[in-house]
Image (tube, grey):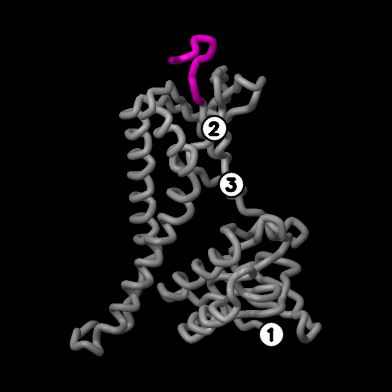
Amino acid sequence: MFNQRWDYDLLVIGGGSGGLACAKEAAQLGRKVAVVDYVEPSPRGTRWGLGGTCVNVGCIPKKLMHQAALLGGLIRDAPHYGWEVAQPVPHDWRKMAEAVQNHVKSLNWGHRVQLHDRKVKYFNVKAGFVDEHTVRGVAKGGKEILLSADHIVIATGGRPRYPAHIEGALEYGITTGAADVALECAGFLTGIGLDTTVMMRSIPLRGFDQQMSSLVTEHMASHGTRFLRGCTPSQVRRLPDGQLQVTWEDHTTGKEGTGTFNTVLWAVAPRVSACLPTTVGHAGKTR
């Protein structure tokens, strides 16, 4: 039975995969449930909707972009099987991005509908604890609301880090996860025709079987992904033409290297200050 002392039996802070699953299961068991979800803008001002990292900036868009890369590979292979396809076939990044974003928005709406259907109350506010049974939610416009619950679940997840000690990292870079995510991103970027370079401090896929890791990187290299091994970046700066110049130290030779890129993607492990930084969109020679 619902405890009348509180607004809800269960309050879930976080609208990602875990938080939504928890809320919906509790509601199916007859509990009065609410979900509080709020996305802090990234350093670039990016926001997203209900569904968490996986739906908005993780697995779902990544798989769609992998599919785009696979389709490109099939088109390139098609002439060998008798299909008369003019080569090369250009790829429109903006069109792909629009399609991905539209699909993600449909999933955001779908999650809201699912909560409504299960009678789970949704609040788009940033929550902070007042006491063990009460949170204060602050909406985008500053309006506050107090919510109480018998039980409160924290399911907020986390964000990838910027390597703060590297000059220009925050100002000019974007972020993703580390290790396997870094190589996944590099793989589909190469697959859709972008000149992509992966810089890594030590070994690829740390913690994975290294025989398999080598097979992965060898396969990627054979398809055009460049690898800079044993290197750590020290600076990113914007050139007058808008390109990004990355400076790094090569620990094998002890020399300094530079390269020019369109985009720098930091794929940094949460507990390591600089691991697997990935530079994307090569536009000049490295030396």
Residue 251 against residue 244 in the figure, above or below: below
The picture places residue 105, in percent across and down from the top left corner, at 37, 45
**Labels 1, 3: front one:** 3
Quadrant in which residue 192 is drawn: bottom left
Q: Earlier in the sequence, mark 2 or mark 1?
A: 2
Q: Main secondary structure of the magenta part?
A: loop
Mark 2 or mark 3, which has the lower sequence index?
2
Amino acid carrying label 3: it is Ser
- Is 98 in the magenta? no
Q: Which residues are magenta?
A: 1-10
Instruction: Give the side of residue 133 with respect to residue 236, left or right.
Output: left
Please tell me whether residue 3 belongs to the stretch shown in magenta: yes
**Crowd tier of the residue under label 1, counting other residues whose Cα lies within 10 Å: few below 14, some 14–19, many 20 or above:** few
Mark 2 vs mark 1, CA separation in Å: 48 Å
What residue does disc 3 label?
A: 42
| Residue 138 image point, x, y percent | 57, 25
Determine contact: label 2, label 3, CB under 8 Å: no
Judging depth in this view, the residue of 231 and 196 nearest the camera is 231
Disc 2 element: strand
What amino acid is labelled 1 in the image?
A: Arg
Q: Nearer the viewer, mark 2 or mark 3?
A: 2
Relative to 120, 41 lies left or right: right
Q: Quadrant location of the C terminus?
A: bottom right
- What numbered label is drawn on residue 287? 1
Q: Nearer the viewer, residue 176 or 263?
A: 176
Of residues 59 and 245, the one drawn nearer to the viewer in this rendering = 59
What label sits on residue 13 in the rendered view? 2
